[in-house]
Image (cartoon, grey):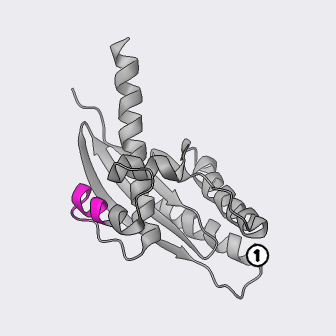
């Protein structure tokens, strides 16, 4: 017996461009609903850029009404200042769906790549190619949007595994 479809919002946080992608699962069927990017202006102050990400994601949550959300975890790199700014964008990406009452899951970049391309170190071209296979109607215009769809698909796969494990007990 198949329950109601579940809408999942995937978010790939970034200060310049935050990718978003929405998929729907019904039983074992996965469908594409939308994707894109929230862009910010490099010349704006940090607070204005974070507000732009907030407002853009609010529009997406209002438009698609997701049941669940998934955000890519931040990786630490050599540039501490850039990592901190990315963390702030990621905070916005987590707060927006949470504020709307949507549960938010987090996935490491390597897990997303492994779930989509079968290897934890797949490149962006491989991710885009596999998103095209998994979601034939999807035509992401940026790597960020493709990554966001990959995050949503990863959540769909891991979410189903969790439901099956609980059902088997």
Which sits in the foreground, 118 or 116? 118
Is residue 12 visible in this depiction of the protein? yes
Q: Which residue is identified by label 1?
A: 46
Instruction: Name the quadrant containing residue 54.
Output: bottom right
Instruction: Name the quadrant containing residue 3.
Output: top left
The x, y position of residue 123, in whole percent, is 41, 64
Is 97 on the left-hand or right-hand side of 66? Answer: right
Placement of 19 over or under 93, stated as above or below: below
Residues packed near mark 1 inside 10 Å, few (<14), some (14 to 19) or many (20 plus): some
Placement of 40 over or under 106, stated as above or below: below
Q: What residue do we see at 60% from left, 68% from top?
A: 14
The x, y position of residue 7, in whole percent, is 38, 48
SS assignment for the magenta stretch, majority: helix
Which sits in the foreground, 20 or 14? 14
Residue 140 in the magenta stretch? The answer is no
Is 165 on the left-hand or right-hand side of 132? Answer: right
Task: Indicate the secondary structure of the residue bearing disc 1.
Answer: helix
Residue 132 in the magenta stretch? The answer is yes
Tell me where the magenta segment starts and ends, as one range: 129-137
């Amino acid at each position: 017996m198949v329950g109601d479809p579940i809408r999942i919002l995937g978010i790939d946080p970034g200060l310049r461009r935050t990718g978003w992608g929405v998929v729907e699962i019904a039983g074992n069927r996965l469908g594409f609903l939308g994707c894109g990017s929230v862009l910010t202006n490099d010349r704006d102050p940090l607070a204005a850029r974070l507000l732009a990400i907030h407002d853009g994601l609010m529009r997406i949550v209002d438009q698609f009404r997701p049941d669940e959300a998934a955000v890519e975890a931040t990786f630490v790199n050599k540039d501490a200042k850039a990592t901190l700014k990315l963390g702030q964008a990621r905070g916005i990406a987590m707060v927006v769906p949470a504020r709307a009452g949507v549960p938010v899951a987090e996935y490491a970049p390597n897990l997303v790549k492994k779930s989509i391309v079968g290897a934890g170190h797949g490149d962006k071209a491989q991710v885009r190619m596999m998103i095209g296979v998994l979601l034939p109607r999807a035509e992401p215009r940026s790597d960020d949007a493709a990554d966001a769809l990959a995050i949503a698909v990863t959540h769909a796969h891991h979410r189903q595994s969790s439901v099956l494990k609980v059902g088997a007990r």
